[in-house]
Image (cartoon, rainbow, N blue to C red):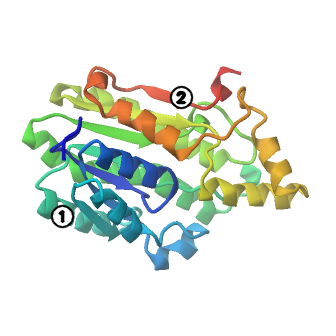
């Protein structure tokens, strides 16, 4: 397989559907071998909705581009599962050049003072702490190989603005931006860039689930709930997973080798208001 990323090895978390799936396939199209993970069936209940179930199909789509795929169930809240996934990836590919921290959840919209500990902790653990855990697992070998690398943390416009009733989500994404910027400084001497992708309202199953919650809470139809959520978008469109993937492909490209500690906004103008 020839391509801009030929010979590179990548990891994508939360890859069973949506942005993760699109990113994994885009990496494969560019020639990278891709290891993908998502939560197993047992973990789906605790995070609030079904996130996985399609990893094998994504792996087949990756391999259709003439590269290697590794698919494995992994709850990114569990360091032991992350370590097992990393060990399997290293055994299969020999090393990792690109880490895409895409795993994330969006549930439980309610005022901050009404949030319970479990909802808060799960949001922070999946959206923020997991990115640090994954980086901690990947970086020793990435640094030791001395070939540089790319880390992209899939954050959100919610890492830059505050959204009422989603304090826990905003806190997790603001925290991810802080992690991105701090690690960018730490890893620059190793030629490892660390950047964040910050989408607005993306047309995914996760957003569809959250929109259903908004519709129920406000007595709206699904279409009305989507219209309400698009209010901050200057361009009144939902972002597609493929548009997110295209932005990630820039951040992992050679053209972006001097881009680090940045936030690439694909939010239809939300953060400009």
Count of numbered marks: 2
- Between 247 and 137, the residue placed more toward the observer is 247
Q: What x and y, as percent, mark residue 173?
A: 53, 42
Distance from disc 1 to disc 2, alpha carbons, whole Å, reads 33 Å
Q: Is residue 140 left or right of residue 221?
A: left
In the picture shown, does residue 237 fall above or below 207?
A: above
Check disc 1 and report the residue beneath it.
87
Q: What x and y, as percent, mark residue 67?
A: 22, 55
Who comes first in sequence, dot 1 or dot 2? Answer: 1
Which residue of the protein is positioned furthest toward the right in this rendering? Answer: 219
Q: Residues within 10 Å of mark 1 (few under 14, many from 20)?
A: some
- Between 104 and 171, the residue placed more toward the observer is 104
Q: Secondary structure at mark 1?
A: helix
Q: Is residue 232 left or right of residue 103?
A: right
- Between 249 and 159, the residue placed more toward the observer is 249
Measuring 91% from the left and 58% from the top, which residue is drawn there?
219
Rendered image: mark on residue 263: none
Q: Is residue 91 left or right of residue 256?
A: left
Q: Please indicate, yes or no, whether residue 83 appears anywhere in the rendered image.
A: yes
Measuring 68% from the left and 57% from the top, which residue is drawn there?
208
Q: Secondary structure at mark 2?
A: strand
Check disc 2 and report the residue beneath it.
265
Q: What x and y, as percent, mark residue 215?
A: 83, 57
Which residue of the protein is positioned furthest toward the left in this rendering? Answer: 145
In the picture shown, does residue 78 fall above or below 266?
A: below
Q: Quadrant of residue 3?
A: top left
Q: Please indicate, yes or no, whether residue 75 appears anywhere in the rendered image.
A: no
């Amino acid at each position: 397989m020839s391509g801009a990323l030929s010979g590179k090895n990548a990891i994508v978390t939360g890859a069973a559907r949506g942005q993760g799936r699109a990113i994994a396939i885009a990496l494969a199209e560019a020639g990278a071998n891709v290891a993908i993970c998502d939560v197993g069936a047992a973990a789906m209940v605790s995070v609030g909705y079904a996130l996985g179930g399609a990893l094998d199909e994504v792996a087949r789509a990756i391999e259709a581009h003439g590269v290697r795929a590794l698919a494995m169930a992994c709850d990114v809240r569990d360091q032991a599962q992350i370590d097992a996934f990393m060990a399997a990836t290293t055994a299969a590919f020999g090393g990792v050049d690109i880490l895409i921290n895409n795993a994330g959840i969006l549930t439980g919209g309610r005022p901050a003072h009404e949030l319970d500990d479990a909802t808060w902790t799960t949001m922070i653990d999946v959206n923020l702490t997991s990115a640090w855990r994954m980086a901690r697992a990947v970086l020793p070998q990435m640094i030791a190989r001395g070939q540089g690398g790319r880390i992209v943390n899939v954050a959100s416009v919610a890492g830059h603005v505050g959204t009422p009733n989603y304090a826990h989500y905003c806190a997790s994404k603001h925290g991810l931006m802080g992690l991105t910027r701090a690690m960018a400084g730490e890893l620059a001497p190793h030629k490892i860039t660390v950047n964040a992708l910050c989408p607005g309202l993306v047309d995914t199953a996760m957003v569809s689930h959250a929109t259903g919650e908004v519709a129920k809470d406000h007595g709206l139809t699904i279409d009305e709930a989507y219209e309400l959520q698009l209010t901050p978008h200057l361009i009144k469109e939902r972002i597609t997973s493929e548009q997110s993937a295209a932005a990630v492909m820039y951040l992992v490209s050679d053209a972006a080798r001097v881009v680090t500690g940045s936030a690439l906004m694909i939010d239809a103008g939300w953060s400009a208001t």
